[in-house]
Image (tube, coloured by chain):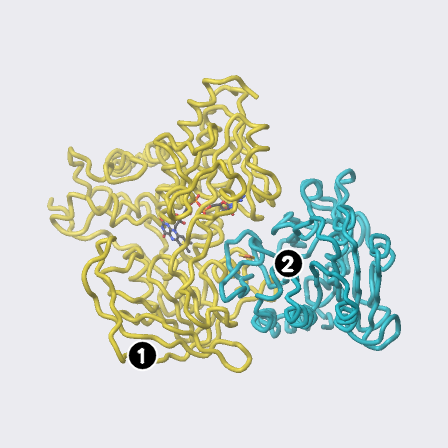
């Protein structure tokens, strides 16, 4: 039988309905569809998908089990390499990773690897997650700073090896960006909680309200623990640096998303944190964060939601699925357009953004064609809210609190090939070491660091 | 969870609480602040630290009941617990022996000023304190501050106690009298800090102000607390809360502090509290 050229479609909420709620957009595969999709995999010998996966999930192997209907076994294979499959099955940029290298691309669409991963993780969660076997306690203790994907993965792996782990988190909730950044309609918080509960069931303790560098220092952690892992992420918002950026109604993506997601401003005043968007919102940038902002603005009541981006669709860094969903929901894309000034009313509230049209010139260092302003092309758009989503830099709080921790050009912590920082015994990974990247890369760094930390602490005397 | 160990009413809508938070008390320094959240549905709000007791593990906060969260906080009793209490956040005050310092507190701004006065005195400064309020019933911490002050003044808008007028009148007089003032701390309503900073600028007299913008995380992640200082964006939660008063854009701060005024009123109405 010839292989079906397209992925099996995944049922989704109707765009007209979903912009009025925060429920997850896709419903996921049924068991039958998942098995049918798994059968599309031709089990090619050179396994390009696994090679393209940052944590080297044995993709053909779990698909093979799934195709044969051995769902529990498929879950086991999947989970032996990834700690957060329900998360990755929703937010990974598959098209640049596993699916981007799938042999089936020569024929048509790749195997829906992301959708299969998501199916397996959801199947297992509904059934009740099996607790993995733990190694004998080693008596060693490690402090993990930050409960984002990097920190949680590192903590989970070290706990499985038998070490005692305490996670220090600045906020009142775990998950990092998974909790405060990525919206409910893309990653339900219930899933993040389930993944965190699993990690806690391994014996990991999470202490909230602990701002490392303020409430407790890295040095104090080093005195108490055998090793320290820093996974504090890239939480520092970048600004456009144009006039009017301090006006009322201009938010960083982080502030806007944190208010809505973590503080649940969509349920104001029942939940006490306010956040308003008015009738017209404009988001600046075109990555995942920008798509999240523009789509959240719609759900917060905006009648019109713009994405304003200085390059073209081809250069947009967001995942294909996000761009596709944003378009379906009626987000208006103003491409080759760059903001030059925010204009306020007499009360200091934003009322418009002045923009300039751009064209693409020669490629820059990043290989993308550089946008150049077109003279005399300025125009204004009336808006009530501006959401600045042009990227985040590594959070400087921890590096600044300990001068022995050396940082590099973008403020990221300098680490060696074993993820060790310039302070012996202190390791780092995720966005704090790489600059803003992806969930799967942060997880991969957490895993590699756990291996390095294990080696490091097993070769010295316990504290 | 962080239990309330003590509660006192200082004036009509100003309350003092001691909260048990040993990890914060251990590290707290004058000039820093905390962020608290009352319960699962609560907002995260910043409050400056008034005092701390490292032995008992308590942190003292003083707040005016102005919005939904501070009003709700005011209704809590001894033994009730706060869900979150994070800190100490921000940079501590630069405490050193400057010589003669003037410390000006307006309204509840007097609360965060108290530990600064105490520390400045301890390292040997000649401390001149000026406390201002709309009327006598809104003055606070008079006795405590007097204890650490070499000279002590009170002003009230209505003349019900001390000098009738503004804190800046007393400061102007001190300058006119030729006092060798090295530095001024001014903490209070934005308009008061602005007036003081404008006055001292004429004499090139260094002035520190403590800013109180709306915050969310308090760790430099959201940028909601941004203020314009010397024409540049600064985050009050990590670069502040204290800044050089001659460089702060106070008008922008006043605008940004009104960001959620309408929503706050709405929330108070629904919750049945008066604003
Ligand atoms: C809105 C948004 C959408 C995104 N969408 C995608 C997507 O679709 N796909 C994808 O792959 N990636 C996406 N990303 C990127 C991805 O979320 C990050 O790369 C990833 O979360 C990084 O993980 P991390 O563990 O390094 O850091 P974070 O997730 O940032 O976690 C860091 C944690 O450390 C805590 N912390 C910080 N400072 C301290 C301190 N001093 N003391 C204690 N704790 C501290 C923070 O509170 C936080 O909990 C998105 C990011 C955002 C903001
Ligand atoms: S409160 Fe969020 S950055 Fe300061």
Chain coloured cyan in the rendered structure: B
Residue A228 coordinates in the image, percent (x, y) = 50, 32
Residue B111 coordinates in the image, percent (x, y) = 76, 58
Residue denoted by label 1: A378
Q: Residue at x 37, y 54 (%)?
A: A27
Q: Residue at x 11, y 44 (%)?
A: A1
Residue A412 coordinates in the image, percent (x, y) = 41, 44
Residue A256 coordinates in the image, percent (x, y) = 48, 62
- Secondary structure at numbered mark 2: strand
Q: Chain of mark 2?
A: B
Can you say whether A142 is above or below A66 in the image?
A: above
Q: Quadrant of residue A71?
A: top left
Horizontal side of residue A210 vs A237, given as left or right: right
Q: Quadrant of residue B269?
A: bottom right
**Colour of chain A in the rendered structure image:** yellow
* Nearer to us in this view, A348 or A206: A348
- Secondary structure at numbered mark 1: loop
Residue sitting at the far bottom: A346
Instruction: Note whether ligand 2 is within 8 Å of mark 2.
Output: no
- The quarter in which the C terminus of chain A is drawn is top right
Asked whether the viewer can see residue A300, the reply is yes
Q: What crowding class fits label 1: few (fewer than 14 Cα within 10 Å), some (14-19), or many (20 or more)?
A: some
Q: Chain of mark 1?
A: A
Residue sitting at the far front: B178
Horizontal side of residue A432 vs B136, given as left or right: left
Residue denoted by label 2: B45
């Amino acid at each position: 039988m010839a292989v079906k050229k397209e992925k099996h479609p995944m049922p989704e909420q109707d765009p007209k309905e979903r912009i009025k709620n925060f429920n997850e957009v896709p419903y996921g595969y049924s068991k039958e569809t998942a098995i049918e999709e798994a059968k599309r995999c031709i089990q090619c010998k050179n396994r390009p998908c696994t090679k393209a996966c940052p944590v080297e999930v044995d993709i053909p192997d779990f698909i093979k089990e799934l195709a044969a209907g051995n769902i529990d076994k498929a879950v086991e294979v999947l989970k032996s390499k990834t700690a957060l499959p329900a998360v990755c099955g929703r937010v990974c940029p598959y098209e640049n990773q596993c699916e981007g290298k799938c042999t089936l691309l020569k024929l048509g669409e790749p195997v829906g690897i992301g959708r299969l991963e998501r199916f397996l993780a959801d199947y297992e969660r509904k059934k009740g997650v099996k607790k993995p076997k733990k190694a004998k306690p080693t008596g060693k203790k490690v402090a993990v700073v930050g409960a984002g994907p990097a920190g949680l993965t590192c903590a989970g792996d070290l706990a499985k090896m038998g070490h005692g782990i305490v996670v220090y988190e600045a906020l009142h909730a775990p998950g990092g960006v998974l909790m405060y950044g990525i919206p409910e309609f893309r990653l339900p918080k219930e899933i993040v909680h389930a993944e965190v509960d699993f990690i806690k069931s391994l014996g990991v303790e999470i202490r909230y309200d602990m701002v490392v560098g303020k409430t407790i220092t890295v040095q104090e952690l080093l005195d108490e623990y055998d090793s320290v892992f820093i996974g504090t992420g890239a939480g520092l918002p970048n600004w456009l640096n144009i006039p009017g950026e301090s006006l009322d109604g201009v938010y960083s993506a982080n502030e806007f998303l944190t208010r809505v997601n973590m503080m649940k401003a969509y349920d104001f005043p029942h939940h006490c944190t306010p956040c308003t968007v008015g009738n017209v919102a404009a988001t600046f940038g075109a990555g995942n964060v920008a798509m999240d902002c523009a789509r959240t603005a719609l759900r917060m009541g905006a009648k019109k939601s713009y994405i304003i981006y200085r390059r073209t669709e081809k250069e947009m860094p967001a995942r294909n699925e996000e761009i596709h969903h944003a378009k379906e929901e009626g987000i208006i894309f103003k491409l080759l357009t760059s903001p030059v000034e925010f204009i306020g009313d007499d009360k200091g509230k934003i009322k418009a953004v002045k923009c300039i049209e751009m064209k693409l010139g020669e490629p820059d260092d990043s290989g993308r064609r550089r946008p150049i302003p077109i003279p005399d092309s300025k125009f204004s758009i009336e808006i009530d809210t501006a959401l600045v989503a042009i990227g985040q830099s590594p959070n400087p709080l921890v590096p600044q609190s300990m001068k022995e921790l050396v940082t590099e050009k973008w403020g990221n912590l300098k680490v060696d090939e074993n993820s060790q920082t310039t302070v012996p015994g202190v390791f780092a990974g995720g966005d704090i070491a790489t600059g803003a990247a992806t969930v799967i890369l942060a997880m991969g760094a957490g895993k590699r660091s756990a291996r390095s930390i294990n080696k490091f602490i097993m070769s010295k005397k316990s504290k | 969870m962080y239990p309330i160990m003590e509660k006192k009413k200082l004036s009509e809508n100003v309350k003092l609480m001691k909260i048990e938070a040993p990890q914060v008390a251990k590290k707290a320094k004058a000039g820093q602040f905390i962020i608290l959240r009352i319960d699962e549905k609560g907002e995260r709000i910043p409050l400056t630290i008034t005092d701390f007791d490292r032995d008992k593990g308590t942190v003292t906060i003083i707040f005016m009941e102005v919005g939904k969260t501070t009003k709700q906080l005011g209704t809590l009793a001894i033994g009730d617990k706060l869900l979150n209490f994070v800190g100490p956040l921000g940079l501590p005050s630069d405490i050193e022996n400057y010589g003669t310092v003037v410390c000006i507190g307006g309204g509840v701004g007097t609360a965060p000023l108290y530990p600064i006065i105490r520390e400045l005195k301890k390292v040997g400064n000649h401390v001149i304190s000026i406390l201002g309020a709309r009327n006598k019933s809104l003055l606070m911490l008079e006795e405590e501050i007097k204890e650490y002050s070499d000279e002590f003044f009170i002003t009230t808008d209505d003349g019900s106690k001390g000098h009738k007028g503004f804190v800046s009148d007393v400061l102007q007089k001190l300058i006119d009298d030729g006092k060798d003032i090295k530095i001024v701390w001014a903490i209070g309503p934005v308009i008061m800090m602005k007036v003081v900073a404008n006055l001292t600028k004429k004499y090139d007299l260094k002035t520190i102000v403590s800013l109180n913008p709306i915050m969310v995380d308090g760790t430099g992640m959201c940028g909601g607390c941004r203020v314009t200082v010397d024409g540049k964006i600064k985050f009050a939660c990590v670069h502040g809360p204290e800044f050089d008063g001659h460089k702060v854009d106070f008008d922008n701060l006043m605008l940004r502090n009104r960001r959620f005024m309408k929503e706050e009123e709405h929330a108070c109405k629904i919750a049945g509290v008066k604003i």
